[in-house]
Every structure is written in C-alpha cells, then in structure tokens.
Amino acid sequence: MKPLHPARWTAVVALIAGLSVASPAHADRAGTRHSDTFLRGLDLDRATVLDLQRAMDRGRFDSVALTRFYLDRIRVVDPLLHSVIQTNPAALKEAERSDRRRRHGGRGALEGIPVLLKDNIDTVGPLRTTAGSLALLGARPAREAFLVERLRAAGAVILGKANLSEWANFRSAPSSSGWSAVGGQTNNPYVLDRNPCGSSSGSAVAAAATLAAVTIGTETDGSIVCPAGASGVVGIKPTLGLVSRSGVIPISAQQDTAGPITRSVTDAAAVLAAIQGVDPRDPATVPGGDRDYLAALEPDALAGKRIGVWRSVAGDDRDVLATLDAAVATLRSRGATVVENVELEGLDEVGEAEFTALLTEFKHDLNAYLAATPGRHPGDLAGLIAFNERHASTELRYFGQELFEQAQATTGDLDDPAYRAARDKATSLARQAIDSVVSAHRLDAVLAPTNSGAWLTDLVNGDDFSTFVSSSTPPAVSGYPAITVPAGHAGKVLPLGVTFLGTRFSESTLIGLGYAFEQATRARKPPAYLRTLP
C-alpha cells in the first residue's frame, strides 16, 4: 500500500493517542441541565480533590454520595458528549468500601475519589477494555494495569471508562478524533459540533464536563495535551518511565505514557503522585522514590525562573498569538525572566523518522499485547485487519485502516537496522532540540501554545489540520514531560492552552510553573454546551 506522506503524518502524529451531534433542543437546555455541578453546596466543577477530601472528612458527604452524583450526571449530560463508554457497575460498592476505610484513616489523597480511565487501560471484572474497537469486546485481561493498581492503593473509586479515538488514533488517516466504533463520536463540550482533539478525547471532555473528579489519558504524541487544551483542562504528559505502561494497549513502548487530565493543576499533581512508581512488568520505570508533586504547588513558583517562548509554532493564528502574548505578560508580572523567540532546532527531520519507527513498534507491541490477553479476540494485527474487513459496515463505516495495513506490511523487527536508525534519529533529534535550547539559554522551561481552536467535526473528510497548532512532538518523541494549562479562548468560546515543557523528570518544576500560572490567570471557564457557533 502507498505509504502515508510524511507531511500528512506530521499533522496526524500530533493527535495520536477519534457522530452524533446534539439536536438543537438538547443544546438549548444546556444552561439549565448541565450547569448544576453542586453537591451539598460544594461546586464540584471548581473543587479540587483536596477540597473533596476535607468535605468527606467533615461528613458533608461521603464517597457513595459523590460517586452517585457523577453516575447521575453522566446519565444526564453524556448523551450530548459521548465521552463515557461504560460506567462501572461496582462503583457504588467500591465507594462503600472507601467510606468504611475512611472511618479508620483511609489510604491517601485519592481515598473515595471517582476516576474515569481511558478505555485502553486494562481493568478486570465487569469493566471491558476495548480501545474503542468491537474486536476487543470479548477481551478479558487477566490483571489490571499497574496504574489502576496504584489508583486503588491510593483509595480511588474506578467510575468507568472514557471514550477515545479508536486504537488511540493509530488506524487511519484521515480520521475523526474522538470517534470509536464502541463509543461513537465524542463532542467538544464547549461547542458540540467541534472536535475534542486527540485520542484521550473522552477523558478530557469528561473532566471538563465534571463527569468525574479526575480522569486518566494516554499519549504517544499529543493525545493528552491536545484534548486537554481543546477542552479547557489540565493535562500532564509525564517523562517516559515515571508511570508504568503495563496493562495499557500500546502503540509504542518508546513513546507511550499515561497521565492525568483534570480541571486543576492541584488535581493533576495529586493523581500523578499516586500513579507513579516502579513496575517490574515495565522495564522503563525507574527508581527514585515517591515524588510529592503536591509540594510543588507554590503560587510564586514563577518568580526568578527563566522561561523561553517557542513562538514560531503558533504560525499566524491570531487567537493563539494573543493568548501567548497574554501568557508572557503573566509570566513577567509574576517575576519570571522571559526569553523570547527561542527555537527548537531539527524538528523538521523528526516526523518522518518517528512515523517509520512507530509503524514497526506498533506491530511488535500490539501483537505482544494481544497474544498475552485472554478472551475471544483477534490474536494479532493481521487478525484485527481481517476483523475490520468482516465488520466493515461498523468498523470501517467512516474511514479505513491504512495505518494498520502499513504497520502490518513492515518486515523488520526491533533489531532491524533500518528501524533502529529511524528510532535513534527521531529520539536523539527531539532530545537535542529541548536539551540544547534549555542549556543555551539557561532555561527552567519552554512555553509554547498547546492548540488552536477546535475544528468542526467531519466524519467524511476527517480532522482539519489546515490551521492546526501543536507543540506536542518534542516532548513526546524525546520522552520528556509537558503540562498544558488553560490560557484563553478562540473567539471567546473555544479553549486554548499553553504548554510548559522541560527536560527529563522535570515534572516538579513544570507543575509549579503551571500552578502559579493557573492561579494568576484563572483562565478556565466551564463548558457552554453550545450546539454550534453563530
């Protein structure tokens, strides 16, 4: 099959990780049906997990009441959004157990906190793990993902699974971000006919719409930060090796990672602290002790820091540039030294090498996952391709499986010299781009725009990259961390984010910068659930 053109891949890879648009009648009721986010007088749209803990400790409500609130809200709100594939039938029982534990001291910062997981993260029992594909409805993972075990150890309640771009958006190009055969098309909660971006679309939309206290997404290149930016929430793409990938349906062990998507930096810090850890099943995870990311939440963290601004990535998008200008003004007002117009060199050579490497890695890693997962499902990528052909009326209804076919056509494995050359080139160039600019300008971090305004969802032609702005590739390919924080709006409605990115294991610094920026700007607004823009 003809390979995907590298220029097209540069746009597509930024969204790796996905109709039924609401009727006017539904959207017109959004103001009254969907603005009620209060539980016993506490606004859950604004409350952090720390606020929730204090409320439960004081008996204002318990985890059962909190969990029931989110389950009820999902039933009312999610028909507009299609952000949740499945709720956990055992969620209320898990909340009951949490309430009993609380009476004896509880487990941690996430005790009793309902969490939605992206549906490529393994769970056992009644919750399926499908990656949005009908092919995995019969899969029965033998063990939960390590990060789910970590969440449970911290006391969290697993609320359900979030919709996603099917197979984390590594099946076809063009495709519509947020679409899966199992969950349908996820809609942007700010304007329902706009796209949610990236493959962790359901996680970001559910967080924005207050359908869970916190959510978990995954990223290969852009699939945490882009949907978080497009839905006006916070997303952390951690350093490769901080959070285990065992039990997460893979694209690439060289780039995949899971991370939090939340309404506040506080919540993201609390979740990241809980899910980090060394996992014998994931050799990339590294020791170094528990990192207390809540300790990084200092309102004056920007003071004295040197931050470079990667401005050229914004192109000529006026809304993005205006948001970036406002962000720079905030940095300066809070005592940061701003180094304007820094450039990350060598990125024009990364895209093609990254795509070449990902095709080989996807075939190898997905085949290994399928072979190790019990249940009735195709045993390898070739079987998935055949399944989709047999079920073309549903799986291939809107777009094809060109990326599947290109990956299947690769003949080398992970020891193939051509593959190794492509992977080494992509990773080394991305790391050099970040390391060199940080070193040359003595930076604590680089600031860049996360996204441009969300495009119209189009299931016929797929995602519209014609004016797309993204800064995800350098941290994604290097394996370095990034955090996106709400920063403004396109057309006063569609959310725009800014990203702080840095060198390996600089999460504490980035979280501190993101928190100080968030506290200074208070840029996030709740979703409007508009049917369309005028």
Image (cartoon, rainbow, N blue to C red):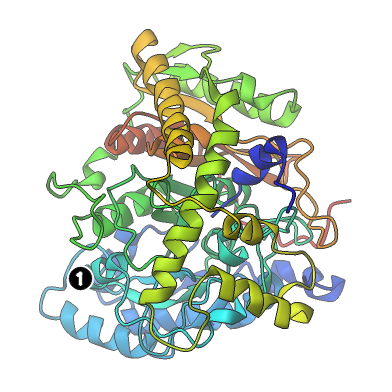
- Res 165 seen here: yes
- Res 336 seen here: no
Residue 288 locus on image (x, y percent) = 13, 44
The quarter in which the N terminus is drawn is: bottom right
Q: Answer above or below: position of 534 versus 335.
A: below
Is 335 situated left or right of 30 in this image?
Answer: left
**Label 1: how many Cα within 10 Å (few below 14, some 14–19, many 20+):** some
Comparing 327 with 160, the one in front is 160
Comparing 14 with 304, the one in front is 14
- How many tags in the picture? 1
Badge 1 marks a residue whose secondary structure is helix
Comparing 183 with 454, the one in front is 183
Residue 527 locus on image (x, y percent) = 64, 57
Which of the 4 image quadrants contains residue 258? bottom left
Is 142 situated left or right of 26 in this image?
Answer: left
Q: Identity of the amino acid at label 1? A: Ala
Q: Answer above or below: position of 245 versus 76.
A: above
Comparing 74 with 88, the one in front is 88
Q: Answer above or below: position of 504 versus 331.
A: below
Which of the 4 image quadrants contains residue 222? top right
Which of the 4 image quadrants contains residue 101? bottom left
> Which residue is denoted by mark 1 in the rendering?
153
Kindly identify the residue that appears in the image at 71 percent across and 35 percent down. Answer: 7
Residue 293 locus on image (x, y percent) = 25, 45
Considering every residue shown, the one lying at the far right of the view is 534
Is 330 situated left or right of 30 in this image?
Answer: left
Is 235 situated left or right of 505 in this image?
Answer: right
Kindly identify the residue that appears in the image at 73 percent across and 57 percent down. Answer: 175
